[in-house]
Amino acid sequence: MVKAAANPVVIDRRGGVALWRQIADRLRGEVAAGAFSEGDRLPPEFALAGRFGVNRHTLRAAIAALVDEGVLRAEQGRGTFVARRRRLSYPIAARTRFSEGLAGQARERSGRLIEGAEEPASRDVAAALDVGDGDIVTRLETVSEADGRAVSRATSWFPARLKGIERHYARSGSVTRALNALGVTDYVRRSTTITARHADPADLADLGLAPGAILLVAVATSVDGDGRPVQHQVTRFAADRVEFSIEHS
């Protein structure tokens, strides 16, 4: 099905954001909102260029970014089509676990350790983990995948009493199993804050996204059965691959 060009769009030529990125953001948002369905063919280049008031070179840069990102696919001689896969529904609840949360939606769920290091706690991390400013904590940089596709990129901090957690995570690919190995049999989220932003270069590379991609960012602190913080985490999700489901207790 070929979608007709929508009403003209006014883009900001003085705000400092590249025109192609604004167009990519707009088209990505329209796909996410259902204005285009999977398999729909986009209007021809001249129609889209006219809609946004740009030349074809600028439009092609936006389309190329969305093709690289996997939102669109280009077929030689046929046009450009919507190729967005179904989003995974990720639950935000007291006991959110990556593998359990995606059960039934993905055959394979795994975690990969990028880096583990000990470092002085920043003020925000210290407050979240209830330790002193500058106290040594363990930082893990991880990527979580579903069916071989990167879904999220996380930075997590753990208090000193959980020293060695990076070794357990590297073996299991699971924060829950790593905490279990260190004697934390259960933990719950004390708080979660969700925002959105553009992906930075590191997240683009680790999640396999194109410039201009949008991330959903969840900042969470988890505590054990005694109410002691065990993890503070900033997780960046690819917005075109995941949607959040808020579960009320």
Image (cartoon, helix red, strand yellow):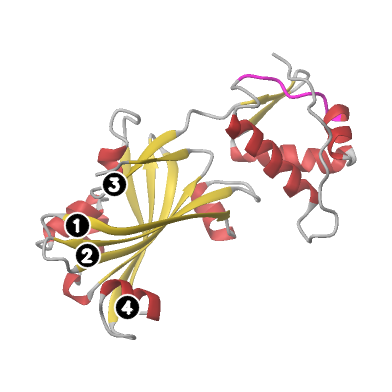
The residue that appears at 12% across and 63% down in the rendered structure is: 182
Closer to the N terminus: mark 4 or mark 3? 3
Q: Residue furthest top?
A: 1
Give the percent coordinates (x, y) of residue 175. Answer: 25, 55
Amino acid carrying mark 1 in the image: Ala
Cβ atoms at labels 2 and 4 below 8 Å apart? no
Query: Quadrant of the rendered structure where residue 105 is?
Result: top left
Residue 165 is marked as 2
Which of pointers 4 and 3 indicates the residue nearer the eye?
3
Mark 2 vs mark 4, CA separation in Å: 18 Å
Residue for badge 1: 178
Q: Magenta residues, as a range?
A: 39-45
Q: Is residue 13 visible from the viewing direction of this image?
A: yes
Give the percent coordinates (x, y) of residue 44. Answer: 82, 24
Which of pointers 2 and 4 indicates the residue nearer the eye?
4
Compare residues 189 and 136 and report the one nearer the observer: 189
Residue for badge 3: 93
